[in-house]
Image: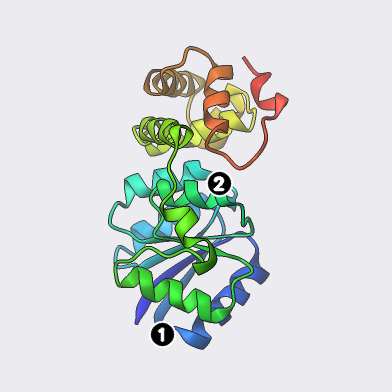
Amino acid sequence: MAKLIVADDHPLFRNALINAISSTFATKATIETDSFDSTCEALEQHPDTDLLLLDLHMPGNCGFLGLIQLRKTFPALPIVVISASEELDVIRRVMAFGASAYVPKSANPADISAALNAVLAGELWVPQNIKKQVLEHSDHAAEEDLDLAAKVAQLTAQQYKVLYYLTEGWLNKQIAYDLHISEATVKAHITAIFRKLGVTNRTQVVIQAQRLTLEPPVNKAMAQH
């Protein structure tokens, strides 16, 4: 029996997923979270969590960036990504960035159970029909992404939050207000982000970060200087 955290910001899908899991998979506890911050808090409060089921689209979770941060902070925790996307590139990158499994939201309960059991047994899992394409694929672009992911993994939790807000196009004063810190501290975090990512301005930060998101570039995020 496993202790799970189900992280998804849509209550209806969380309930449906939990029901699907309970019909075929034995759990001793299931904790629900609806944002990146609440997921991190739950993981800290429940260090005995056996599996994290993570949606890539949640408040505070900027595509692959959240997965990279979780992988760094909780290196021993198996992470099962649950996503509506069934694009091969997305699945390949999720696995390259350290997920133990990728389960499409279209999967049936039997597949979800198979994925969770495989991960608990120490295996990797992706849908059988694309397994060879995903797990045996590597190219130069993927290597570049892994290099950037390693740089992102150097960020502290607070710096990651600032990076997330930068990708959303927030001003320093907005970031300071939301994080309850001074604008000087925000500027210090941004300077540290520049150094760790090897860039010199906010536009370059956002361009780099967008390589690790699921969204197309947005002008609003690059317009703030």
- Label total for image: 2
Secondary structure at numbered mark 1: loop
Secondary structure at numbered mark 2: helix
Disc 2 residue crowd, few under 14, some 14–19, many 20+, Cα 10 Å? few
Identify the amino acid type marked 2.
Asp
Residue 60 picture quarter: top right
Disc 1 residue crowd, few under 14, some 14–19, many 20+, Cα 10 Å? few
Identify the amino acid type marked 1.
Ala
What residue appears at the point 28 percent right and 57 percent down from the top-left corner? 76
Looking at marks 1 and 2 on the same chain, the residue that comes earlier in the sequence is marked by: 1
Q: Position of residue 91 (x, y in %)?
A: 52, 53
Residue topped by disc 1: 26
What residue appears at the point 65 percent right and 21 percent down from the top-left corner? 222
Image quadrant where one finds the C terminus: top right
Task: Return the residue found at the far top.
Answer: 200
Pick the residue in front: 133 or 94: 133
Q: Nearer the viewer, mark 1 or mark 2?
A: 2
Pick the residue in front: 138 or 144: 138
Label 1 to label 2, Cα distance in Å? 32 Å
Q: Position of residue 196 (x, y in %)?
A: 37, 23
Examine the rendered structure and indicate whether residue 9 appears above or below residue 67.
below
What residue appears at the point 34 percent right and 57 percent down from the top-left corner? 44
Instruction: Specify the label residue 170 is tagged with.
Output: none
The answer to whether 25 appears left or right of 173 in the picture is: left
> Does any portion of residue 10 appear in the rendered image?
yes
Image quadrant where one finds the N terminus: bottom left
Instruction: Specify the label residue 89 is tagged with.
Output: 2
Pick the residue in front: 135 or 199: 135
Q: Position of residue 47 (x, y in %)?
A: 30, 63
Q: Position of residue 17 (x, y in %)?
A: 57, 74
> Does any portion of residue 180 appear in the rendered image?
no
